Amino acid sequence: MSEAFRGLRVYNTLTRRQEDFVPLDAGNVRMYVCGPTVYDFAHIGNARPVIVFDVLFRLLRHLYGAEHVTYVRNITDVDDKINARALRDFGGEIEAGRLTLNEAIRKVTETTARQFHADVEALGCLKPTAEPRATEFVLPRADGKTDMVSLIQTLIDRGHAYVAKGEILFDTASMPDYGELSKRRLEDQQAGARVAVDPHKKNPSDFVLWKESSAQEPGWEGRFVVEGREITIRGRPGWHIECSAMSAAYLGEIFDIHGGGLDLIFPHHENEIAQSRCAHGTPVMAKYWMHNGFLQVEGRKMAKSEGNFVTIHELLHTEKFGGRSWPGEVLRLAMLMTHYREPLDFSVRKLEEAETVLDGWYRAIGDVQAEGSDISSDMLRALQDDLNTTGAIAALHELRAETAKGDKEVRRRLKASGELLGILQKTEEEWFSAKAASAAVDPAAIEERIAARLAFIREKNFAAADAIRDKLSGQGVQLMDYKDPETGERRTKWEVKR
Ligand SMILES: Nc1ncnc2c1ncn2[C@@H]1O[C@H](COP(=O)(O)OP(=O)(O)OP(=O)(O)O)[C@@H](O)[C@H]1O
Ligand SMILES: [Zn+2]
């Protein structure tokens, strides 16, 4: 048996089977997960893949060593939805000439990305090894890392792409096994295509690699050579090519795991595979494809378009869901109580259940530290079985039952095992006092005090400003000032300190 196999088995969407996980290189296990398109707050459905693949990242680090795992999760900061949002929020300032469209777009993406980072940190997620932004990989780079324009050129050179009506399209008929991930065969798609075909496409399934921008739209000078002629199309990349470029830039032409939610299988992942395999001439893009099921509300996928979403921010910091705010750890455990491939029906009851469980576990661990303790072998076995987190949680319940005997080593093992799931990182005291503090603070009132303090600072009334800060500090609320990276203005964030 290969020493690269460490007991982990995963369900591979590519083969529709559970398989032994054998990385290409046990010294550098490589995983790519499609990240957020940053135009709005992430909802708790979007949090599911982030949490699921964080658990997998932690497990891989445990099995292969932290320094032997590379996890890349991109940020999509070029998309027509972002442009639309920039125009909606900053249209007036753009018209008045105070902002360019590009500056407005930057504001939207930076604010949203910052929010996303705060959200996922509160959910106990580790930072990925790299978090590339799509806009930095559009044009050829000084460091020679794979970029989108060069990748598209390779596809043109190899006969997999063509130019039509200001677009560069991927020619799906040029790839005999197009559709292998989603098991949609090209012939079926053509036969079944009821929608009118765009007349400039050779096949209805052909998709955009690069599209021309109007003068008002953001664009890059894309230089291509087509049939010996140089052409320049000021345009922007299609969505799929972003991930093909950034995964190759960080993980190479073939890597181990590619992940995301079920809805990405088609067309996004299918098209990533088509681009990457045809550009590199490789038999696979990633060996294992893993997809999480949907988080649902009353049987329907939580989605922006459905209007049935709750943002992570609302859940953590407002009383919109269930009339109270919730600790990030509660949301995390609630997610892990369902196997990642199953649909997860989300409810207040589920959060309450997770919170009760955490209260019990924290009471059991008290103030012990996990360092040097083994983790539960039952829990590890469950996680190695295609991330069976329900089995892992059952193992933690058993450990908790054993702690009744007062054995310190069992309590330490409970904590160490919880930490592998990204929970139980605090002590009992920290957990309960943070809960008490967040129950006592009223975020809206704090924001109002912060605004008042900033107004005093602008008026140079520092005594009044300091008085507000000290009063909040006495209530356990700590203020932190920082400069807005774009405008240089002073801003303030806050957290509950105990
Ligand atoms: N309800 C959900 N349950 C689980 N995963 C989801 C859900 N909705 C989106 N995702 C996942 O979140 C990640 C980000 O997706 P994407 O950027 O497409 O979100 P989105 O367009 O804001 O979602 P939507 O429009 O569906 O609300 C993807 O991996 C996607 O599969
Ligand atoms: Zn992707």
Image: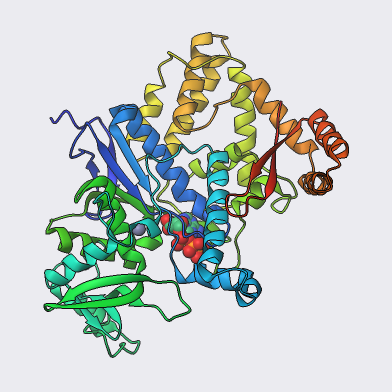
* Residue 160 rendering spot, x and y as whole percentages: 16, 72
Task: Note whether 273 is above or below 10 in the view shown.
Answer: below
Q: Nearer the viewer, residue 129 or 483?
A: 483
Judge left or right: residue 230 versus residue 403.
left
Q: Nearer the viewer, residue 282 or 414?
A: 282
- 497 is higher (above) or lower (below) than 344: above
Image side of residue 187 versus residue 10, left or right: left
Lateral position of residue 225 relative to residue 297, left or right: left
Tell me if residue 25 comes above or below residue 97 in the rendering: above
146 left or right of 434 in image: left
Kindly identify the residue that appears in the image at 36 percent across and 66 percent down. Answer: 239
Relative depth, front residue between 460 and 182: 460
Q: Is residue 232 visible?
A: yes
Residue appearing at x 84%, y 48% in the figure: 459
Examine the image and state in which quarter residue 268 appears. Answer: bottom left
Q: Give the quarter of the figure containing the C terminus.
A: top right
Is residue 43 among what the camera can see? no
Instruction: Please state the horizontal and vertical placement of residue 476, each as a whole percent of the image.
Output: 77, 30
Instruction: Identify the residue shown where x is 44% and y is 29%.
Output: 420
Residue 165 position in % (x across, y down) = 29, 86
Its colouring scheme is rainbow
Numbered circles on residues, count: 0
Q: Quadrant of residue 326?
A: top right
Picture residue at 44% right of the left edge, 72% below the top: 218
On the image, the x and y values in percent for residue 142 come to 28, 52
In the rendered image, the vertical position of residue 111 relative to residue 230, given as above or below: above
| Image quadrant assignment for residue 229 | bottom left
Quadrant showing the N terminus: top left
